[in-house]
């Protein structure tokens, strides 16, 4: 925006200052235009003339040093250049403008009396992209203090904090550095583990940016203690199988050292450890026990454990009913599953996951088989006893019939009446 101030020698008689010479047929006038420019840019300072009769024109800087006398350079400053000198317009340029160049530039017209007009040069200093500083590190469960700063602007820049499209009110402070201003905006926000990596932005607004804004993006870095979880193998394990455990660890900073151990014992000789992975080939029952994975950083430590139970490798070719084995479910889907993994929280470490196992005892299966055998034996004994008793009763009836025939025969030999004897017998 340019503002013009005109000094006209032809003024009404009611004005106290008379600038028009009586002997002059017409009056001369000079007009200066105000200029606004960005720092580092080029300013054009113009002096417009009316009814110019060849009088001396002088241009001076704010310190009243003569820059040009008519068209001749008077001050040795190569940033100033005379680009136009006509009876209507005198124009100079100033390159690489700084805030120290702003002020009033005098356009003077020398006649019998000296008269001048002032062209005011204003310099705008747009803010650079603001910076973000963290007073102290953000730790889970605490607060973080963030300060957005714009160290230099003119006029003072406006700062605004944004998170998820919403403005976060901040405490604004401003400092006058003479020609420029430094501005800061400070916010305090609570942080949790879930806030790690959250995006915030600080925006700077300024008239020199023409509706645009300078933005500094920032991601929260929240520190928290680690969590540990052992990823168990699927199915159940038996002798000869291989075991592979993976220790899944989170934390900020992420723990670099992961420790594997066996509770109340040393690790097996065939155990192989590669970072978070623990492996044992050709399992045996001597490997049974509880294995522990531990990790820690500067903000805490965590652990998780896994209980290994290896079963006998029982052959299925014997006549005895097959005993359930610990063959993995994926290899033998028809084998009953005796081991069921479950998880329970560790009292010492709420973030850890503990795997436990339960198994059906072999004594129950043996008891059921013994009961079945005992029942079959009892049924056989009762059946045999009933059969023997029925046969003895039949033989007794046959012996009784023979005695009756013997009496008849004896009567016949003794001369008794056979018919009578027969009757008597029949009776």
Image (cartoon, grey):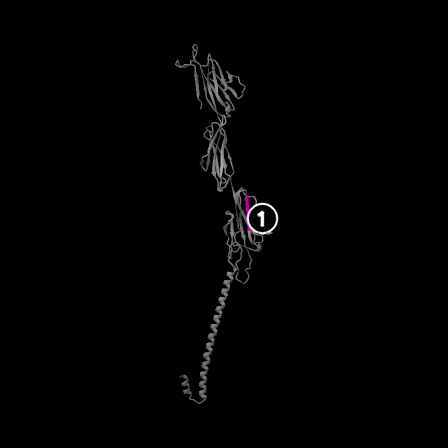
Figure quadrant of residue 4: top left
Observer-nearest of 114 and 407: 114
- Majority SS type along the magenta span: strand
**Relative to 294, residue 389 above or below:** below
Question: Residue 381 at what x, y percent from top left?
Answer: 49, 70
Residue 216 horizontal/vertical position (percent): 49, 34
Q: Residue at x 47, y 73 (%)?
A: 387
Q: Is residue 273 left or right of residue 37?
A: right
- Quick check: is 295 in the magenta stretch? yes
Q: What residue occupies the far top of the structure in this picture?
A: 23
Farthest residue, direction left = 14
Q: Residues within 10 Å of mark 1 (few under 14, many from 20)?
A: some
- Quarter holding the N terminus is top left
Secondary structure under tag 1 reads: strand
Number of marks in the image?
1
Depth order, front residue of 159/316? 159
Residue 288, above or below 111: below
Residue 253 placement (x, y as % from top left): 54, 41
Is 381 within the magenta? no
Image point 44% across, 19% down: which residue? 5
Rendered image quadrant of residue 298: top right
Question: Residue beneath label 1, please?
Answer: 273
Frontmost residue, 359 versus 396? 359
Image vertical order of residue 389 relative to residue 427, above or below: above
Q: Position of residue 118 (x, y in %)?
A: 46, 19
In the displayed orientation, state which residue is furthest to the right.
Answer: 269
Closer to us: 131 or 68? 131
Which quadrant does the C terminus fall into? Answer: bottom left
Q: Which residues are magenta?
A: 291-297
């Amino acid at each position: 925006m340019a503002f013009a101030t005109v000094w006209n020698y032809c003024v009404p008689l009611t004005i106290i200052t008379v600038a028009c010479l009586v002997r002059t047929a017409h009056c001369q006038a000079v007009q200066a235009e105000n200029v606004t420019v960005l720092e580092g840019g080029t300013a054009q300072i113009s002096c417009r003339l009316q009814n110019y009769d060849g009088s001396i024109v002088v241009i001076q800087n704010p310190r009243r040093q003569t820059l040009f006398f008519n068209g001749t350079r008077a001050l040795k400053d190569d940033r100033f250049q005379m680009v136009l000198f006509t009876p209507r317009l005198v124009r100079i340029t100033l390159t690489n403008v700084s805030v120290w160049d702003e002020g009033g530039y005098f356009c003077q017209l020398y006649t019998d009396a000296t008269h001048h007009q002032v062209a005011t040069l204003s310099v705008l200093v747009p803010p650079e992209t603001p910076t973000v500083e963290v007073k102290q590190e953000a730790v889970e469960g605490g607060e973080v203090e963030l300060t957005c700063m714009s160290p230099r602007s003119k006029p003072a820049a406006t700062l605004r904090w944004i998170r998820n499209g919403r403005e976060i009110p901040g405490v604004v402070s401003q400092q006058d550095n003479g020609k420029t201003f430094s501005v800061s905006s400070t916010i305090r926000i609570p942080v949790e583990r879930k806030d790690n990596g959250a995006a915030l932005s600080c925006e700077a607004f300024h008239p020199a940016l023409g509706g645009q804004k300078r933005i500094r993006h920032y991601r929260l870095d929240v520190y928290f203690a680690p969590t540990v979880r052992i990823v168990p193998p699927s199915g159940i394990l038996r002798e000869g199988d291989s075991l592979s455990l993976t220790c899944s660890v989170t934390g900020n900073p992420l723990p670099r050292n992961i420790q594997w151990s066996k509770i109340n014992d040393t690790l097996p000789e065939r155990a192989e450890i590669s970072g978070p992975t623990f492996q044992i080939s050709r399992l045996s029952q001597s490997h049974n026990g509880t294995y522990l994975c531990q990790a820690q950083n500067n903000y805490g430590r965590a652990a998780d454990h896994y209980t290994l139970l290896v079963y006998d490798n029982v052959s299925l070719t014997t006549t005895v009913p097959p005993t359930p084995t610990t063959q993995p479910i994926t290899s033998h889907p028809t084998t009953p599953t005796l081991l069921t993994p479950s998880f329970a929280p560790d009292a010492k470490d709420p973030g850890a996951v503990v795997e436990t196992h339960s198994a059906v005892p072999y004594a129950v299966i043996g008891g059921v088989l013994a009961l079945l055998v005992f029942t079959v034996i009892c049924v056989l004994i009762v059946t045999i006893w009933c059969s023997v008793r029925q046969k003895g009763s039949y033989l007794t009836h046959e012996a009784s019939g023979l005695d009756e025939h013997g009496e008849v025969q004896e009567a016949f030999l003794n001369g008794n009446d056979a018919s009578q004897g027969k009757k008597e017998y029949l009776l």
